[in-house]
Amino acid sequence: MTQANDQPFPEDGEPTVFATVMAPHRSLSARGFLIFMLAIGGLSLASGFYFLSLGAWPIFGFFGLDVVLLYFAFRANFRAAAAREYIRVTPSLVQVRQVSARGEAKEARMNPFFTRLKRRDMEEIGTLDLSLVSRERQVPVGIHLGPWQKAELADDLGDALGQVKRGVTRTVF
């Protein structure tokens, strides 16, 4: 079975003015996760044995529970890292494909001549929200990005939409 993440857009022969793939940022590698869990597990085990030697045996179980909860929280975080967002701008189409961590894909197609970029900025923070708006349809983009990355994406998307509206040489009709 083909996963939704495997094929962002079919090749249609049209020149691509702008294309990007975005994913949630994850700073902890699998090896780092293993080292972290071993350190937390060892620390909890040592602390648990200390409290066990003092006769406070119920605390030993709570230390184990903390480690188990941390493990499941990080596993959920790693599963969420599979989410992707694809954006492609061609002379005749703006495509946005958002793939959830479960592999469920939502795709939006818009005419670039009727598409505009809507952004909400705060001076001290940066770009908070970024959307592509075409007629009555509004598609949020850059949902995995931080404020400064959204500002960069907005500039790049704005340039691409402007280039398409000024005219791009088309090879396929």
Image (cartoon, grey):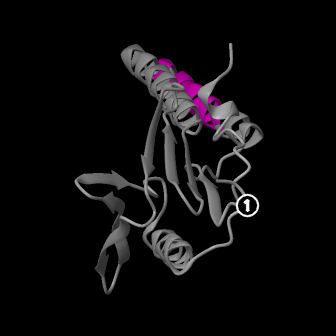
Residue drawn 26% across the image and 58% down it: 135
Query: Camera-side residue: 71 or 82?
Result: 82
Q: Is residue 47 shown in magenta? A: yes
Q: Quadrant of the N terminus?
A: top right
Quarter holding residue 35: top right
User: Which quadrant of the figure has residue 79?
Assistant: top right
- At label 1, the amino acid type is Thr
Dominant SS in magenta: helix
Q: Position of residue 13 (x, y in %)?
A: 74, 49
Q: Quick check: 29 above or below 162?
A: above
Residue 38: in sight, yes or no? no
Q: Residue at x 68, y 65 (%)?
A: 170
Residue 94 seen anywhere in this rendered image of the structure:
yes
Foreground of the two, 78 or 65: 78
State the SS at label 1.
loop
| Residue positioned most to the left | 136
Residue 19, position as x, y percentages in the image: 64, 59
Extreme residue toward the front, this view: 173
Residue farthest to the bottom?
123
List x then y, in percent, for residue 23: 58, 49
| Front residue (pair 103, 49) | 103
Q: Badge 1: how crowded within 10 Å, few (<14), some, or many (20+)?
A: few
The magenta span reads 37-52
Relative vertical location of residue 45 with respect to residue 14 in this rendering, above or below: above
Q: Is residue 7 left or right of residue 155?
A: right
Q: Image point 46% across, 63% down: which residue?
A: 112
Left of 13 or right of it: where is 90? left
Residue 72 vs residue 149, the one in the foreground: 149
Please provide percent x and percent y for residue 152.
53, 76
Residue for badge 1? 171
